[in-house]
Structures are given as C-alpha cells and as structure tokens.
Image (cartoon, grey):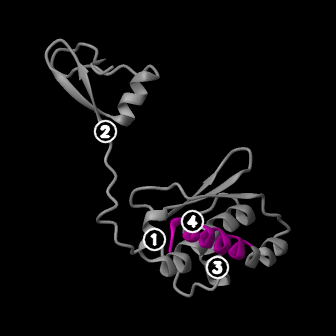
Amino acid sequence: MTTDDLGARLIAATQACLQQATPLLRQAARTMPQVQIRLDLRGRVAGQLRRYADGRLVIRYNLSLAARQPDAFIAETVPHEVAHAVTHVCHGHVRPHGAEWRRVMHWLGVPQPRRCHTFDTDTAIRTQRRWRYQCACRTHQLSTTRHNRARRGTAYLCRCCGDALRCAEP
C-alpha cells in the first residue's frame, strides 16, 4: 500500500468516525467545526488533536507509524483522536482521557479505550540537529529548539565564563 493510499484511508476513516459521532453532538446541542486532517506527525506519537483559540480543530497522524500496522492504527488511533475532538466540542475542557472521552470511545466502538498506543517506535526516534555556539572559553552544542529561541532573542550564557553564546554557524 502506498503512502497516498494509506493517507486516503486515514482521512476516510476519520470522516466516518466523525459522522458516527453526529448523534452525540446533536444530543449535546453542538455542531462539529470543520476538522482539518494532516499526515505530518513524526517521532513516537501516533496521533494528536490540536485545538486553536479561533475554534479550529486539527487532527494529525504519524504516517510512518500507520504504515507499519495500518489496520490496527485505523482501528485504534483514528477513534482515539476523533473522541478527543468530540469530547472537546461537547464538554469543553475536561481530563484528556477521562470519563467523557471514554464514553465517546465506547460510542465509536472501542470496548477497551487506552490512553497510549502500543505500536513499535524503536525506529521512530526523532533527533534534533545540534548547532555550534561559541563563548569566550569554549564551543557549545545547542539543540534546534534552543537555536530557534536564540534567533528570536533568548540569550544563553556560558556557565563557566558567563559570556553570551553566539552562533558559530553561517
């Protein structure tokens, strides 16, 4: 199965799950906003729901994890993330894997809802690039996260000499 085929299956399964939850939304007198589905998640996380202040909902899936066990991924991760979306719309801010979420999971046909997946992630390790930074006494290695913060104005100081770290890479 190609990644395009798998992506199409994930999108179709998500839309079917959202449709299946329509009676729950109707019962709570709520309407589901448009849910964007993205296949760009990386690392060890199988799926993620992102809620934005403007009301947008985005469900993200890890396509590389889904490719290893597509049927299990669709059966477990898709209802898991849809249940988060439905729970948020119906109940607002509640415990992420609390009673409300579990009830939605049961509605979606998952008899034993689990908080975490059991997919093999040994080869899914995501490492950050290291950036060389210089001070008065030595060279330091900063992660991409800290490098980006430094570019936005966060100052990092050497613990030995107290000098400000400066990027040594072009």
Locate residue 160: give its quadrant.
top left
State how far apart marks 3 and 2 are (Cα). 41 Å
Residue annotated with mark 3: 103
Counting from the top left corner in percent of width and height, residue 22 is at 79, 74
- Residue pictured at 45% horizontal, 71% vertical: 67
Residue annotated with mark 1: 67
Chain-order first, disc 2 or disc 4: 4
Residue annotated with mark 4: 4
Structural crowding at the residue carrying mark 4, measured as other residues with C-alpha within 10 Å and reported as few (<14), some (14–19) or many (≥20)? few
Q: Nearer the viewer, residue 9 or 41?
A: 9
Q: Nearer the viewer, residue 22 or 43?
A: 43
Provide the residue span drawn in magenta.
1-18
Disc 2 element: loop
Q: Are marks 1 and 2 in contact (CB under 8 Å)?
A: no
- Residue pictured at 71% horizontal, 71% vertical: 15
State how far apart marks 4 and 1 are (Cα). 11 Å
Horizontal side of 40 relative to 132 (left or right) equals right
Horizontal side of 61 relative to 82 (left or right) equals left
Q: Amino acid at mark 3?
A: Arg
- Residue pictured at 66% horizontal, 81% vertical: 108
Structural crowding at the residue carrying mark 2, measured as other residues with C-alpha within 10 Å and reported as few (<14), some (14–19) or many (≥20)? few
User: Which-is-in-front pick, marks 4 and 1?
Assistant: 4
State how far apart marks 3 and 4 are (Cα). 32 Å
Q: As displayed, is residue 98 above or below residue 55?
A: below
Locate residue 65: give its quadrant.
bottom left
Residue annotated with mark 2: 129
